[in-house]
Amino acid sequence: MSPGIRPTTFAHIVYRTYRFEQMLAWYTCVFCAKVQYQNPVIAFVTYDDEHHRVALLNLGLMKGPSEAAAPRGQPGVDHVAYGFGSLRELLDKHAELKAKGVTPYWCVHHGITVSLYYADPDGNQMEFQTDSYTSNDEANAFMHGPHFEVNPIGVEFDPDEMRARLDAGENVAALLLRTTHLPVADVRGSMLG
């Protein structure tokens, strides 16, 4: 039996919180970390050269169902992320899982990553991603640029269409760049809109 395509890194974790400022202060203090990007709804924190290792979502400012109606409105882990070594590996993993009946619930090009979101049978969410830039300095520059400021969430994409473009010989670097900054609805509940 083939071992299949495996992630190369454990990339980051995202927490939902009503204590946004306290959580941000705690994670920067405990991990001797710095804030890479912050707006009132989301913050990205890193303790090394990676663009982010922890992200915090401010539930007090997010749109969506009431906290009583949906677990996603409760504080806790939102998702964990695993990194793949290339866009080809990420899209091959998508094809491998799709053939087994496992499909992502959300496919989004964040700008710093191209990402596929899956949920396990208990509803635990995970992000499979590949970096859009070859260096963290380039990713950090994107996070401080105008496209990220306008839309720190990203734009949706079709992984089958992207794979067809890759198979047709389209330049990988071009596919990895987010060329639009127009936000789209977050199909996970429009909480990040």
Image (cartoon, helix red, strand yellow):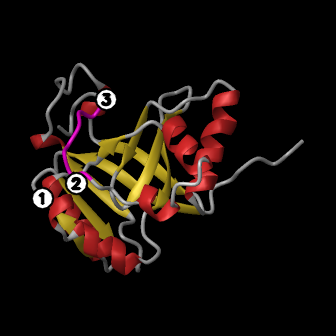
Main secondary structure of the magenta stretch: loop
Secondary structure, mark 2, is loop
What is the spatial separation of the Cα atoms under label 1 and label 3, in whole angstroms? 21 Å
Mark 1 or 2, nearer chain start: 1
Q: Position of residue 190 (x, y in %)?
A: 22, 30
In this rendering, would 85 be left or right of 157?
A: right
Residue 152 image label: 2
- Height in image: 190 above or below 6? above
Amino acid type shown at disc 3: Val
Location of mark 1 (residue): 39
- The image shows residue 192 at horizontal and vertical percentages of 20, 39
User: Tag 1: residue type?
Assistant: Asn
Q: Quadrant of the C terminus?
A: top left
Residue at 23% x, 19% y is 69
Neighbour tally class for label 1: few under 14, some 14-19, many 20 plus, Cα within 10 Å: few
Name the image quarter holding residue 40.
bottom left
Query: In the rendered structure, which segment of residues is drawn in magenta?
Result: 180-187
Which class describes the residues within 10 Å of circle 3: few (<14), some (14-19), or many (20+)? few
